[in-house]
Amino acid sequence: MPNLLLLDASSSLCSVALLTDQGDFWKTEDQPRRHAQRLLAMVDEILEEAGVSPQALNGVAFGRGPGSFTGIRIAVSVAQGISLGLGIPVCGLSSLQLIARAVCEQDDSVNDVMVIMDAHMGEVFWGQFRRSGDDLMPLSEEQVGTPEVCQQQLSQWQGSIAGGGLQLADFSAYPQALNGIQPEARFMTTAARQAWDRGDFSDPENHPPVYLRNSVAWKKLDEQPSLLKK
């Protein structure tokens, strides 16, 4: 079993996890605007807690997005720095899929999940996923758009829905039971192991971030109007 370090900073949460032969370790903090200060420090903390040296790591997986533009950049930078410093491969995992996987792992009866996240700037991210054995497959391309466009697809959806985007006023008529689930490194464990077994870990240039929006369109997070603030 490889020692895999997992990172996610694609939401207000800053999280790390570590998969080892001795068990899995994870740490999550709600640290909006402090990802740059905390993510690498949390890596050091979890390695110390597990008694694993950096040199014993075999790979790094990170939440590639979509999500917070700044948070994704920080996670990618940390993953790339560790990869280059230790000479180990990386793997980017969908932040939307992490939420869908969390839902499926919490409820074995769930097979289809549509995930909606607040993208700020008057838009939402969304993606649709289906359980396939122990894996989770995307049913369509991940998208960004207005709540109205998302609702057009949601109106035809027969499965579960999850993600913080459900807290927006536009989605208040839909079930809210799963609206608090955000991407976390601890939700990566199964996907990271599967990716390692498939040989998906490789050089950093093969695993770019996924923003779903041109970086020119982004503002600093604290300047982005969230639909939740209405």
Image (spheres, rainbow, N blue to C red):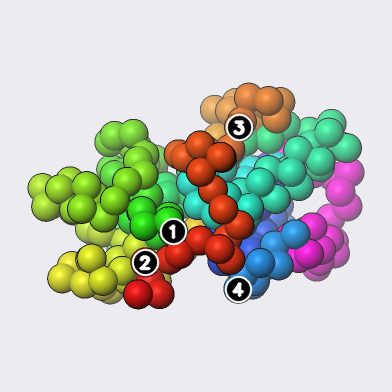
The numbered mark at residue 208 is 3
Chain-order first, disc 3 or disc 1: 1
Range of the magenta residues? 37-59
Instruction: Give the residue at mark 4.
Output: 30
Q: Do the residues bearing badges 4 and 2 touch, measured as CB atoms within 8 Å?
A: no
Q: Amino acid at mark 4?
A: Asp
Instruction: Give the residue at mark 1.
Output: 120
Question: Residue 64 in magenta?
Answer: no
Please tell me whether mark 1 sits on a helix, a strand or a loop. Answer: strand
Name the spot of residue 48 as percent of width and height, x first: 85, 64
Please tell me whether mark 2 sits on a helix, a strand or a loop. Answer: helix
- Residue at image position (84%, 45%) is 56
Q: Is residue 86 visible?
A: yes
Q: Nearer the viewer, mark 1 or mark 4?
A: 1
Q: Do the residues bearing badges 2 and 1 touch, measured as CB atoms within 8 Å?
A: yes
Horizontally, residue 47 falls left or right of residue 190, namely right
Please tell me whether mark 4 sits on a helix, a strand or a loop. Answer: strand
- Residue at image position (74%, 43%) is 77
Mark 2 to mark 3 CA distance (whole Å): 28 Å
Name the spot of residue 196 as percent of width and height, x first: 60, 34
Q: Toward which corner of the image does residue 164 lie, by quadrant?
A: bottom left
